[in-house]
Amino acid sequence: MTEVQSPKQRQNDDEIDLVELILELWKGKMLILAFVIACFCLGFAYVKVVAKTQFTVSTGYTVNLFSGEVFSLCRQDQRCLDGRVAHQYANELAGNWSIDDKSSTLTQSSGAAPQSLNTYSSDLEKANDKLTQSFLQSAKEELAIVTSLSSDLRNTETVAESVLHAKRMIYQIENGKMKALTLTTLVVEKKSPKVALILVISVLLGGMLGVFAVLLKKFFIELKSRS
């Protein structure tokens, strides 16, 4: 008859197996340590030699003004107005700036060391001034075109809205000193490589490989002893 183990006997066997496993890992601690050190060194070498440092420069923005053309296209759709003006602004900027419409953020990524904040701020303000002046010029040209129209055309609702928008923009820029966008404080961040995370993962990987090596070594020893 097959002897059936009681729950207590099975628990004792499990405890013995666990103790044997811990003892075996303790015996192979130097092998595990060697794997940990090797993987740590590989991770460190990757960070220093292979991985490319990536910096990001970002600023938030709020759209204050938009051209008559954008106004005609978007009407009351604020997201459309903001998105089109932001893309016009990005076109005025030097460098590869990307736009996140949802968070209203302008971001530039670079593998080179970032420039000073004053340099970035100066470039952003120059582009803002340029876009603002283009809006002002567009509004003045729009008024001049409307003035040349016949009285019947000037009295239409669409033309009246355009005239009102153009006059409001001219007043806001010339008297209120308003700009196309309001920019928040610049933020410079180092995005990659994430040195601490890479080294922690390297150590954990080394530990797992070391444990696997110890257990594999024990397996082959027992297999050899049985043959």
Image: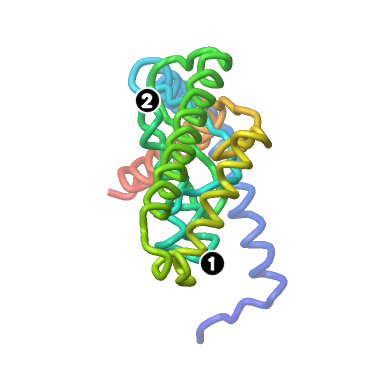
Q: Can you give x and y, in whole percent of width and height, for residue 90 in the image?
A: 41, 37
Number of marks in picture: 2
Q: Could you tell me if the residues under marks 1 and 2 are in contact, i.e. CB atoms within 8 Å?
A: no
- The 10 Å Cα crowd at callout 1, few under 14, some 14 to 19, many 20 or more, is few
Image depth: mark 1 or mark 2 in front: 1
Q: What residue is rendered at 55% in x and 61% in y?
A: 78
Distance from label 1 to label 2 (Cα)? 30 Å
For residue 94, the mark is 2
Q: Quadrant of residue 158?
A: bottom left
**Is residue 18 shown above or below 216?**
below
Q: Quadrant of residue 50?
A: top left
Q: Can you give x and y, in whole percent of width and height, for residue 58 in the image?
A: 54, 33
- Which amino acid type corresponds to the residue marked 1 in the rendered image? Gln
Q: What residue is rendered at 42% in x and 22% in y?
A: 53
> From this viewpoint, which residue is outermost toward the left?
227
Q: Nearer the viewer, residue 112 or 150?
A: 150
Classify residue 142 as left or right of residue 1.
left
Classify residue 208 as left or right of residue 14.
left
Secondary structure type for disc 2: loop
**Is residue 12 shown above or below 170?**
below
Q: Nearer the viewer, residue 34 or 192?
A: 192
Q: What residue is rendered at 57% in x and 14% in y?
A: 118
Disc 1: which residue: 76
